[in-house]
């Protein structure tokens, strides 16, 4: 059977659910359940969009992607440093450069992330069911702090030695020091390169998935222009590009969705 | 079967063209160029133990007993005493033997010394962890830092030191890992150490030799002199940073010992990285450090917290409440979530959108 001749259901099976794919969970047939959830929550048009709301025009919106870009630079330089070994950067010009790239990458990462967080606070980005997006963003920040901290602990020089010796008091006071010895360089190496960086990478992926899934919050006062996809697909005009706000706001279905300040 | 309701929402207003891949790639390239440029121009801090007025130090250097014992220390008149580090080292060795050092009196997870853990009211998280996990990093300062190194490094080749160590051990004092400070010394050992400590304060250290007035110090002078000698020739560092299984990535014992002396803090202060110098968020010299820890650093500068014996616990508790829970749950906390409506920066951010909407209507 040629591709063109495929039934609609089969043609859409990779990108949408079908009647034969029950969304109910089943231990014996988990794949349709997972696929149905994924398709409903992470449609490709959201993961790889070619359109964004017109209000997403401020340069401040770029802070998120700049944070991600800095994270990528940090990961690449970190992998090179890890391959060289923990003391490589002390006696190699390339190693020292990589350490500097890693260092300034982290500075950029936190700078962009701080602006990104403040921006999203002041636009109340948690509106419209985006509370979990906010939570994953804060978790990413907290994990980034721990990841950067463990990086300072594995410098294998006086700097790392002193940071660990000072930090142990806070860790011990909080009861954490009994299992997490910040003066143990070997433990900090695995914590930094595997545990905290791995968790950070995971939570960043979840955060990105949430951002793509929910989209960015509309400007305060324009929440009514955001409607469930079902309505957009079934009840609203098919062409959603460059449509005036007034036309959309006039849609009776949209009136049911009043301003949502709470997440 | 009814179609599953879509959980995501859709913007029905105006849109603009957007290319996620292009924007992402461009962002990575721009940030990479900026970061590499900063790396080339500014480099990164790796100054070893260098500080104004301090002894020379190479990139990558860390603190060692040899550096400690050879380091000059300002005297009462502010002049650098070239033997000050050796004197500080000898004083610290006496404190480790007598159970009066910071490490000996630290409590869990290093030893069973009680009353030193930080508490708020009756709550001690250190105590909770101690109950759950036991003593996870046991240290006996007298044996681990002094007697054991001398027994392994010096005693086999020096009968005088071997006899001194044997006499000292025979006088009592527990050699068990993690015992409380008061069990580290017997009454006899304490008499020797107290007398020697007084004499050391009035004595002289020059060219690696300790000279004190005659007195009843038992084997202590031989032990302290031998410990200073192996610090000066670097073999004590080899012992503290080594392990019975050859490879060691855990310098905890050495760090705890080194930080009991005053030279340790002297280097940190010289580099401007102590707590009172905002060292929590500063890198040495003029490099930016962990500026994102500013919320963690500020409480340490609040007098009521800074002067509290439980400062770390107070700061840690504040950090959990303010730095973690309030941030995480902010969208659900009345008042806090409304701050952006009281300070409506969003009207500036979306001014073009609001203007176009007003014009349309």
Image (cartoon, rainbow, N blue to C red):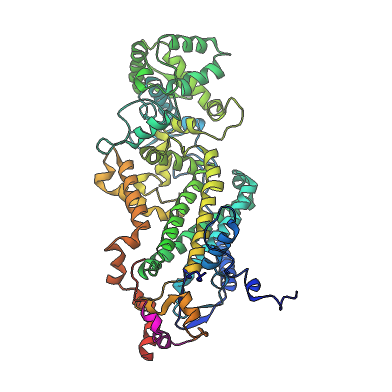
Is residue A251 shown in magenta?
Answer: yes
Give the image quarter of residue B355.
bottom left
Q: In the image, is residue A190 above or below residue B156?
A: below
Q: In the image, is residue B70 above or below residue A226?
A: above
User: Residue B181 versus residue B262: which sits nearer the camera?
Assistant: B181
Is residue B230 shown in magenta?
Answer: no
Residue extending furthest right? A1
Is there any visible trace of residue B40 in the rendered image? no
User: Residue A90 versus residue B292: which sits nearer the camera?
Assistant: B292
First to last magenta residue range: A243-256
Q: Main secondary structure of the magenta part?
A: helix
User: Residue B323 versus residue A216: which sits nearer the camera?
Assistant: A216
The spot of residue B31 in percent (x, y) is: 55, 65
User: Residue A91 vs residue B119: left or right?
Assistant: right
Q: In the image, is residue B235 above or below residue B164?
A: below
Q: Residue at x 37, y 25 (%)?
A: B112
- Number of residue marks: 0
Residue extending furthest bottom? B360
Give the image quarter of residue A134.
bottom left
Q: In the image, is residue A128 above or below residue B317?
A: below
User: Residue B245 vs residue B101: left or right?
Assistant: right
The spot of residue A247 in percent (x, y) is: 42, 88
Q: Quadrant of the C terminus of chain B?
A: bottom left
Is there any visible trace of residue A26 in the rendered image? yes
The spot of residue B56 in percent (x, y) is: 51, 41
């Amino acid at each position: 059977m040629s591709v063109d001749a495929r039934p609609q259901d089969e043609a859409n099976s990779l990108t949408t659910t079908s009647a034969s794919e029950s969304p109910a969970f089943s231990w014996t047939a988990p794949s349709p359940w997972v696929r149905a959830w994924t398709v409903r929550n992470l449609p490709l048009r959201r993961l790889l969009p070619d359109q964004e709301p017109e209000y997403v025009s401020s340069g401040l919106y770029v802070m998120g992607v700049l944070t991600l870009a800095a994270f990528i630079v940090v990961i690449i330089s970190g992998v090179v440093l890890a391959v060289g070994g923990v003391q490589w950067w002390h006696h190699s010009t390339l190693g020292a450069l990589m350490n500097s790239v890693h260092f300034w990458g982290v500075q950029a990462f936190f700078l962009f992330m701080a602006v990104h967080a403040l921006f999203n606070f002041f636009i109340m980005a948690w509106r419209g069911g985006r509370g979990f997006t906010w939570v994953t963003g804060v978790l990413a920040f907290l994990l980034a702090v721990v990841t950067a901290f463990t990086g300072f602990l594995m410098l294998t020089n006086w700097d790392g030695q002193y940071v660990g010796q000072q930090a142990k008091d806070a860790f011990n006071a909080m009861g954490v020091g009994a299992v997490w010895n910040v003066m143990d360089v070997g433990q900090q190496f695995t914590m930094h390169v595997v545990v905290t960086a791995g968790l950070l990478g995971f939570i960043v992926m979840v955060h990105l998935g949430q951002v793509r899934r929910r989209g960015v919050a509309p400007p305060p006062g324009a929440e009514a222009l955001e409607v469930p996809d079902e309505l957009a697909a079934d009840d609203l005009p098919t062409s959603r590009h460059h449509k005036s706000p007034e036309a959309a706001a006039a849609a009776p279905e949209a009136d049911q969705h009043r301003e949502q300040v709470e997440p | 079967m009814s179609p599953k309701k879509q959980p995501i929402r859709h913007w029905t207003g105006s849109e603009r063209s957007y290319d996620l891949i292009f924007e992402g790639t461009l962002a990575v390239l721009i940030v990479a160029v900026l970061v590499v440029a900063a790396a080339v121009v500014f480099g990164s801090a790796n100054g070893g133990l260098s500080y104004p007025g301090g002894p020379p130090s190479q990139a990558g250097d860390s603190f060692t007993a040899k550096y400690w014992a050879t380091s000059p220390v300002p005297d009462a008149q502010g002049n650098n005493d070239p033997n000050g580090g050796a004197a500080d080292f000898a004083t610290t060795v006496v404190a480790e033997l007598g159970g009066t050092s910071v490490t000996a009196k630290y409590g869990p997870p290093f030893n069973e010394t009680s009353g030193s853990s930080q508490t708020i009211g009756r709550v001690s998280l250190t105590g909770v962890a101690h109950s759950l996990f036991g003593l996870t990093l046991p240290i006996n300062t007298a044996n681990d830092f002094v007697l054991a190194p001398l027994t392994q490094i010096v005693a086999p080749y020096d009968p005088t030191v071997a006899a001194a160590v044997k006499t000292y051990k025979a006088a009592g004092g527990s050699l068990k890992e993690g015992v409380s400070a008061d069990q580290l010394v017997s009454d006899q050992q304490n008499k020797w150490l107290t007398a020697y400590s007084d004499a050391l304060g009035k004595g002289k250290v020059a060219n690696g030799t300790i000279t004190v007035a005659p007195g009843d110090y038992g084997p202590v002078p031989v032990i302290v002199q031998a410990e200073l000698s192996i610090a000066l020739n670097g073999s004590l560092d080899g012992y503290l940073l080594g392990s019975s299984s050859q490879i060691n990535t855990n310098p905890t014992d050495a760090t705890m010992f080194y930080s009991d002396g005053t030279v340790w803090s002297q280097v940190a202060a010289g580099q401007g990285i102590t707590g009172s110098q905002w060292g929590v968020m500063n890198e040495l010299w003029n490099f930016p450090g962990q500026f994102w820890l500013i919320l963690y650093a500020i409480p340490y500068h609040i007098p009521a917290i800074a002067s509290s014996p439980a400062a770390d616990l107070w700061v840690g508790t504040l950090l959990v409440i303010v730095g973690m829970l309030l941030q995480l749950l902010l969208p659900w906390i009345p008042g806090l979530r409304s701050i952006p409506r009281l300070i409506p920066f969003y009207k500036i951010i979306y001014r073009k959108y609001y203007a176009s909407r007003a014009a349309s209507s």
